[in-house]
Amino acid sequence: MTVYKRSHRPTWEYNFWWMGRRYTGSTRQLTRKDAETFVKSKRDRLRRQAAGLESADPIDTPRFTHWAKKVLQQKTRTLKRPELLERDLRVMLQFWGARPAAAPADPSRTPYHDLRLGHPIADPSWMAKFEDWLQIRFRSPAARNHARSSLSVCYRVALLPMYRSLSRVTTSPCDHLPRERTRRRLVVLSPTQIQAWIAQAAPHVRLALAIGSLAPKLRLANVLGLRWEDCDPDLTQLTVRHHKTDQDGLPLVVPISTGLQRILAAARGQARTGSIVRFRNRPVHSLRTGLKSAAAAAGVPYGLRSANGATYHTLRHSIATLLAQRGLPEAIRRQLLGHADVHTTQLYTHLAARDEVAPLEDLSTALSLEAALAAPARPKKRRSRTQLRTSGPPGEPQKQAAKRTERGQYNEPDSSPQASDPTTVSPPDRSSS
């Protein structure tokens, strides 16, 4: 039965299967004829949608709240750090998803419109509202770009062949969605500032800062995840199996310098198992509070929101710049920082204007232009009268002047007696009479 009516409801309902999917609901019609007309139009619309001739009805598409779980499940198979995508999806759902029970009601920050994938396709004004909300919600262009990218990922997964029948989406409203230009941060700490920051920190923060400074190939997540099992017994190298630059499945091998070896040996005397960076005999998952308080005590600006504020990641930029100042080749710096592309190493190097003084002094010494500037000027060569008569007007090309000479426009004056005698009268011109 395609249409039917319940005894306690005045409207007719529908129930049918099409392409392996069941469709049920209310036709909102009061007569059987109108209900059958509704079902026929719905079947025709489904055929056109399957052929790509018509967009799906928004009510037939999944909700963003449910689809985000499917997206995270799909992308977890390929992403190295799916927790970052989960964070961005949670932010995106503050606009497109349903409001959780424990979420505070603040429409300006978390409107929670509870929409479906088809709503921004059928009504593009939702994309403009989303952009307006991003401008209010975030001050950082990078944070707004992350929210746009998470929305784009939802539609990229929806357009995969394996999910098209489930998502009922044939196009993406995020196509050609522009991204904002982010401001590049050029914060670099000097060796004195790094030493002061470490000296004012708590013991576990000191250890994490020291490892990040002397082993710049390790990021903060790698440092906090280090275990004593990752070190060889002689403390000559560290082996990190899960890292950001994992492209071929090989672990990240970090040689341990003599200074870092002494630091790790002192830390290993207190605990020989478990995590290397520990606080109250427990693993550490965040250093934000300890880094901030130590930076304030050392007089180092901290945080992305403060002017020239430093973070733990600033250590990698500072070490990359320090290595460049010490004259290490670019290929060696790329290897020490663990970058897959040398272009990333170039972005991490922030040389100041004072670093250009010594090379410019060497360049000035090599060229020695003062002697060339003090040399006497070459005398100007004067042209003869014949050259002046055949050269033509000033600025005329040489080939054009030669053509004028061939036509007789620059021939020398006639030296005959008639031409030289001023009393000689030329015969009258009879052509005019």
Image (cartoon, helix red, strand yellow):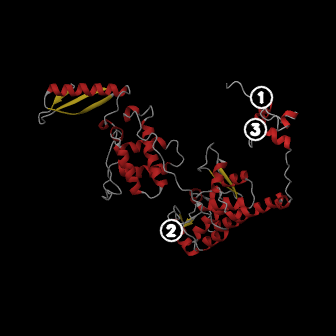
Q: What's the CA distance linking mark 3 and mark 1?
A: 39 Å
Q: Is residue 305 left or right of residue 112?
A: right
Q: Is residue 176 above or below residue 200?
A: above
- Mark 2 or mark 1, earlier in chain: 2
Residue drawn at x 53%, y 63% as measured from the top left: 284
| Pointer 2 local density, CA inside 10 Å: few below 14, some 14–19, many at least 20 | few
Q: Where does residue 46 sit, x and y in percent of width and height?
A: 31, 27
Q: What's the CA distance linking mark 3 and mark 2?
A: 77 Å
Q: Is residue 38 above or below residue 317?
A: above
Pointer 1: what residue?
427
Label number found at residue 289: 2
| Quadrant of the drawing holding the N terminus | top left
Is label 2 or label 1 in front?
1
Frontmost residue, 8 versus 181: 181
Residue drawn at x 73%, y 64% as measured from the top left: 357
Kindly state the secondary structure of the residue where label 1 is placed. Answer: loop
Q: Where does residue 235 sit, x and y in percent of width and height?
A: 70, 60
Pointer 3: what residue?
397
